[in-house]
Every structure is written in structure tokens, then in C-alpha cells.
Image (cartoon, helix red, strand yellow):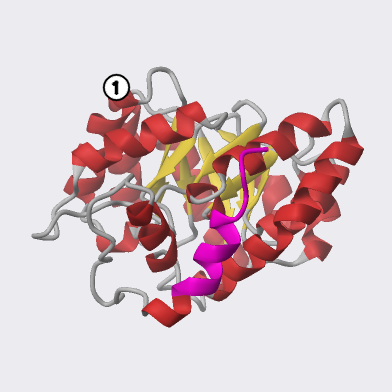
Amino acid sequence: MLAAGVYPAAITPFDSEGRVDLLSVARLMAWFRSRGCSGVVLAGTNGEGPSLSSIEKRDLVRATVPLCEGLPVVLGIATASLEEAVWLCKQANTAGAAAALVMPPAYFRDASEEGIALWFESLLARSPLNILVYNFPQRTGITLSPELMGRLSQHDRMIGLKDSSGNADNLAPYAEAVKGKNLFVGDETLLIEALRHGWTGTISGAANALPDWLSAIVADWATDTESAETKHALILPALQALRRSPQPATNKEILRRRGMIEFATPRLPLLPVAHENVVQAWESVARLSRP
């Protein structure tokens, strides 16, 4: 199991030639540690995981785990290939990662729920690494039902889930389906409602820009729900501005302006964010002092 809290869905910084920039990765990991984060996710949606080769993901997790100084590292896996998913789980386990965050095999959108269940069950049976199941139907075209989540939760290797659907109606059914396991919400605007339903915290793209605020909200929730709710209300306009602006390009530009990374350019087919598109998000974030 993973500790409760905030796990930034880290951007993947690239250098001027488009290679993974490990110096910027080191600065980013120090930023997350210093702002109270409970762990970090690499090569997820916000980390342009589908644009990274399997070798790059292996090398990224190998290089990043030592930089995190004990902060748990989760590797994002988005592939329709069961064999590739198994290989990446093995590589991440050898590197010292704590878990993998795994999307369903998105290319096969017409697969039955039984087929999707068997794909995950085969991975769970073969992986030496614990797994979080990732529901993001806007990207995959596949919706993972509470019933399917409950079935997968019977496997010891399945330690929980992330839901980025943005559907508040999922909060209670998922919590019931995977009792006692990790529950991470992806849409930060739903964080307080998720915490009310007993969720663990958030795996968050916005945590690249606001790791201290989000970490404080989850930490406060255990002892002072009013403080957590007040903090969330204060940052809600910034969260909404971040979600309206193109991602991960906006998070990259904010981190560049803060000196965390040198270049904000994403990989094709994504393009850098236009200045007019980042202004509101940057101003909303920049005006917030530390909580």
C-alpha cells in the first residue's frame, strides 16, 4: 500500500534535442520532496508516457528512484501489449519503484469487459510490482466499472486505483468496490468530495504547479476538515485555470518560469503552449503564497 497524500503526475522534462533531461528531473524531485508530497508518478498522462519508449521509461525510473531519497516512485504504463506491460513492471521493480499505474489496453476499445479483466488479471499474476489500475475513459475510450474494480481488487498485487474520469458519481461506488485499498482522484477539483468518501488523496497533474497546497489539503483533512476545505476553495480558481489550459505544456511552462526545468517543449504531436493560453493559469498560480 502507498501512504495517503499527493503524488504529482510529474511532467517529463526534455533537453534542447528532445532527450529526457535528468538534471531537470533531479530538481523536480527535490521540489516535490520539499513541498510535502507523498510520492511521485513518472511517465503518466501528464508525463507524456505514450511518447516515451519502453527503454526510456526503464531508464527514467532507474535514474529517478535514487533521486527521490525514499519518496515512493510509481511508473505509468499505457500500452495495449500485455508483454510490454509485464516487462515494464519487472524493470520498474528492479529499479526500486513502489508500484505501476496501469491503463487498460486502449487500442482495443471494442474488447469486452471480460477481456479487459483477464488482461489485468494476467498482468497482476505475472508482475512482481504492485499495481494501481487507472481509469481515464476520455483518453482510453474504456470505462472501468466498479464491478470490474472490485473483481481486480481481489488480487493482492492490485493495491488500488486512480480515477481521472472527472465523474463525481464514481467516488462512492469505487470506494465501496476496493475497500481498504488506495483511492486516488485525478481531477483535483473533486479532491474534497473524494476525501469525504474516504479516498486516499490525489495523483495530480496540478501538483506540478501547486504541490504544497494540495499536500496541505490532504494533510489537514485528517485533523481539520474546515482548514482543508478553505484551502481547496482558495486554490480552486487556479485548479480550474490549469485544467482549462493545454496540458502538460502549461505545467511545463510554469515549471520553466519557476526555474525547475530548462525547456518547456513537449514531444510531438503536442506543441508548446501559446503565451495567451498560459497567462491566466500562470497568474492564478503565481499569486498564491505558500499555505
Whether residue 126 is visible? yes
Whether residue 73 is situated above or below residue 24 in the rendered picture: above
Residue 179 found in image quarter: top right
Mark 1: amino acid? Pro
Which segment did they paint magenta?
A: 278-291
User: Which residue is nearer to you in this view: 149 or 99?
Assistant: 99
In the rendered image, residue 130, in percent from the top left (x then y), is placed at 50, 32
Residue shown at 87% from the left, 25% from the top: 223
Most common secondary structure along the magenta stretch: helix
Q: Quadrant of the C terminus?
A: top right
Drawn side of residue 258 relative to residue 237, left or right: left
The one of 83 and 185 positioned closer to us in this rendering: 185
The furthest residue to the left: 17
Per the image, label 1 sits on a secondary structure element best described as: helix
Is residue 280 part of the magenta span, yes or no?
Answer: yes
User: Is 174 situated left or right of 85 in this image?
Assistant: right
Q: Residue at x 54, y 67 (%)?
A: 281
Q: Residue at x 23, y 74 (%)?
A: 268
Up/down of 253 relative to 140, above or below = above
Residue 72 % position (x, y):
47, 27
Which percent across, then down, holds residue 230?
84, 47
Which residue is identified by label 1? 66
- Dividing the picture into quarters, in which one does residue 165 lie? bottom right
Q: Is residue 14 magenta?
A: no
